[in-house]
Image: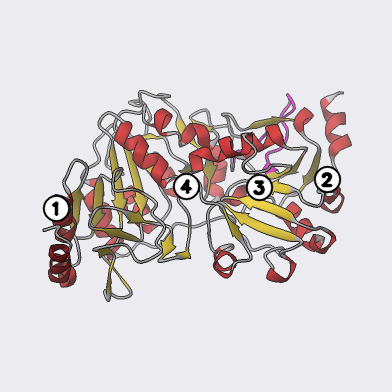
Amino acid sequence: MHLPASYLQKRTSATDAMRHVRNGDSIIVPTGVGEPPTLLSALSEQRRNFQDVKVAQILAVRKYGYFDPETADHVRHVALFLGPASRAGAQAGWVDFIPNYFSEIPQQIERGQIPADVVFSMASPMDAHGYFSLSLGADYTMAALAKARAVVLEVNPNVPFAYGNCLVHISQVTALVESDEPVFEVGLPSIGPVQEAIGKQVADLIDDGSTLQIGYGGIPDAVVMQLTHKHDLGIHTEMIGDGILTLLESGAVTNRRKNYLPGKMVATFALGSAKLYRFMERNPALEMHPADFTNDPMLAGQNDNLVAINATLQIDLLGQCGSESLGSVPFSGTGGQADFVRAANRSRGGKAFIVLPSTAKNDSISRIVPVLSPGTHVSTSKNDINYVVTEYGVAQLRGKSASQRARELIGIAHPAFRAELTAQAKQMNLL
């Protein structure tokens, strides 16, 4: 069929698009701003018409009507990572949570461990060859496309057409709905003096020509702000955001010295401003790929001098990182942290940084602890940890004994807690 005719035949309203959802279905939705608001709003309005429908997503940025404990038996959110929209529901038990490594979600979908009956996704307008770009979230959505019974796209002219393995042909689409509201924008986190101090510690250890993976948060962005004077940096990351855009505008990022995909920035999802989304439009220097490509430690680790910067909530004296829960209370998820720590460890000249403020709750609690709080979900193991950075310095742990690790970590703890940590380490026979 001629492409425009095929497009018109598949165009429908959001209300009518819900006819492609059946009771018991699992709907796969992309990361963050790749979620389709018109489709998810229509699903929310009709949620009482369904039974046992699940919406699986790694990070929801908006709290739609289906985030409702009273209708969770009709439509339930399944979180692959927790954010503000899903966190309270997971803590209360009416949002499901599936532990995972981001890099392995596509494989879990392919193997049927995570069902994928329907795909709902934002998409760019169709090009002259019949292709849409899922530029905002290639992540695990491309794997779901190959498994799904129905693929429903929300086509929006504000979604950029990006290159990479993120393209969907009209022949793969079951139905499409048009919208034109601006893509949801996420601003840069606030950066305070503690974040700035940590950022400087990390930035001083990043060499010209390094390839960067930068997580989301105040400390990773504080690092970024202090790298604008560097030269020939490269980008191989899971998230492209405005911090990376700042580095590009400063001239610090050229991607010229990357030995794996030289000249190309690589990411799997976008989270930022309208300016970022405009930058992505048909930019030959950027490729958006699924997470089993961007986050695979074997592939990402082929970048020499790969620098991974990720945050944690708590770390014990052996170097175990609890980055996703407050004790047993779920807070976020593993995401790509373990993926990129392992990738940087594989990389020739690579450096994996775990960053955290030394204290919490107005300096009343040390984030460096003898043992993790009971029930804490371990995100990065003691065997993977390398550099740990607080505002008080850098602890390099890889290859160090348990005793050496304890000394290194106590040395970067808040001074008010060092004596107590030393006494506790002695009781544990670590010192």
Q: Nearer the viewer, residue 206 or 413?
A: 413
Q: Nearer the viewer, mark 4 or mark 2?
A: 2
Mark 3 lies on a secondary structure that is loop
Q: CA distance from mark 3 to mark 1?
A: 45 Å
Spatial CA distance of label 2 from label 1 is 59 Å
- Residue named by callout 1: 403
> To which residue does mark 3 refer?
29
Q: Which residues are magenta?
A: 122-135
What percent of the width, then of the height, locates residue 186?
53, 56
Q: Residue at x 69, y 44 (%)?
A: 121
Q: Secondary structure at mark 4?
A: loop
The first of marks 4 and 1 along the sequence is 4
Report, in whole angstroms, how far the alpha carbon at label 4 lies from the one at label 1: 39 Å
Nearest the viewer among 412 and 247 is: 412
| Residue 251 appears in the picture as rendered | no
- Mark 2 and 1 residues: CB-CB less than 8 Å, in contact? no
Determine which residue is flagged by label 4. Answer: 241
Which residue is label 2 attached to?
20
Answer whether residue 237 is visible to the viewer in this image: yes
Residue 203 versus residue 394: which sits nearer the camera? 394
Q: Around disc 4, counting alpha carbons within 10 Å, would you say few (fewer than 14), some (14 to 19), or many (20 or more)?
A: many
Q: Position of residue 92 (x, y in %)?
A: 58, 70
